[in-house]
Amino acid sequence: MASPSHLLLIVFLLPALAAFSNAGNIAIYWGQNGNEGSLADTCNTGLYSYVMISFLTTFGNGQTPVLNLAGHCDPPSGTCIGLSDAIRQCQSQGIRVLLSLGGSSGSYSISSDDDATSVARYLWHNYLGGSSSSRPLGDAALDGIDFDIAQGTSDNYGYLAQSLLDLGSQAGTKVYLSAAPQCPFPDQLLGPALRAVTFDYVWVQFYNNPSCDYSSGVSGVAGAWRTWTSSLQSSTVFLGVPASTDAAGSGYIPPGDLTSQVLPAIKQASNYGGIMLWSRYFDRISGYSAAVQNSTQPKNLIPTNSTILIQVKIIQRCPDCNFS
């Protein structure tokens, strides 16, 4: 006698996961203008997936590290430790928060492998998963470190990046690494580090470089983009653009041009991740991210407000069962 079969078909209609929410895939730099609003307000906009707290402007070569957050707070007096609550609030929304090293002003360099190790330990204990009695941003652990290196030499940044990864690995914690090279390839200062270590995110600055930013047209941007994405296939690559005409000397892409011309030309890359904007201050004024957010997702992401259909089939065979 053949065994009876029981087929149970369950259909679930689930809202799209939070990872595919309205935020789009937009990274933003925060911390360089006291009029850009608070960190908590920045995250609460729902516009961003990554926020770089900028900048640690002095480090390396035996110097005492200096965190400069413009008019937001004063690290030496301890007023920045209150940012811990905002950092945790951002992270609870799925936003990754990183500390950005460097910037266009300040004093920074890594003089040797030993110097890189020392800086990595400082970052680990004062901003990441370690412990220190003098953490400038309080006890919240940031998700990682961003390299926005715009001066000095390229020496030893790869060793600094690897040292950060090693410290996280030893503690069983993932340290995310990001970098913001200029669009001419390879970047003079970050090129060696990007070759030596796999960075999770690379937001290439397609501004202030007329040879490859939007001053050279869509074809110029697309050509440089193909070089970057093909050379960094293990990293997720973002298109870095100014959030307004005042944010950079060249490279501004009107939102309509970005969504209708530039993004369709670069989304073909399998490691396209989204866009990076400089900066929160300019974006708050221009509304750039709000205008483009629905167009920034990689092609393989589920659209916002979509529904996931899941069918579960259970086949049960039981010779002695009596199914009604």
Image (tube, rainbow, N blue to C red):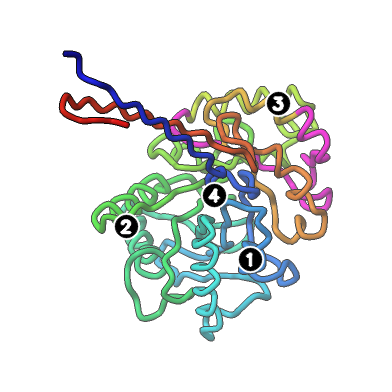
Could you say where residue 10 lies in the image, as x and y percent from the top left? 43, 35
Q: Nearer the viewer, mark 4 or mark 3?
A: 4
- Classify mark 1: helix, strand or loop: loop
- In the rendered structure, which amino acid carries the disc numbered 1? Gly
Q: Nearer the viewer, residue 139 or 88?
A: 88
Among the two numbered marks 4 and 3 on one chain, the one whose residue lies closer to the N terminus: 4
Q: Which residue position is annotated with label 4?
A: 18
- In the image, which disc is placed on residue 264? 3
Between tags 2 and 3, which lies in front? 3
Q: Is residue 238 above or below residue 319?
A: below
Q: Which residue is mark 1?
A: 31
Disc 3 element = helix
Tag shown at residue 117: 2
Residue type at mark 4: give it: Ala
- Across and down, in percent, residue 132 comes to 34, 76
Three-letter code, disc 2: Thr
Stretch of the chain drawn in magenta: 233-261
Q: In whole angstroms, how far apart are the C-alphas of marks 1 and 2?
A: 26 Å
Mark 1 and mark 3: Cα distance apart in space: 31 Å
Q: CA distance from mark 2 to mark 4?
A: 37 Å
What mark, if any, has residue 179 been given in the picture? none
* Mark 2 / mark 3, whichever is N-terminal: 2
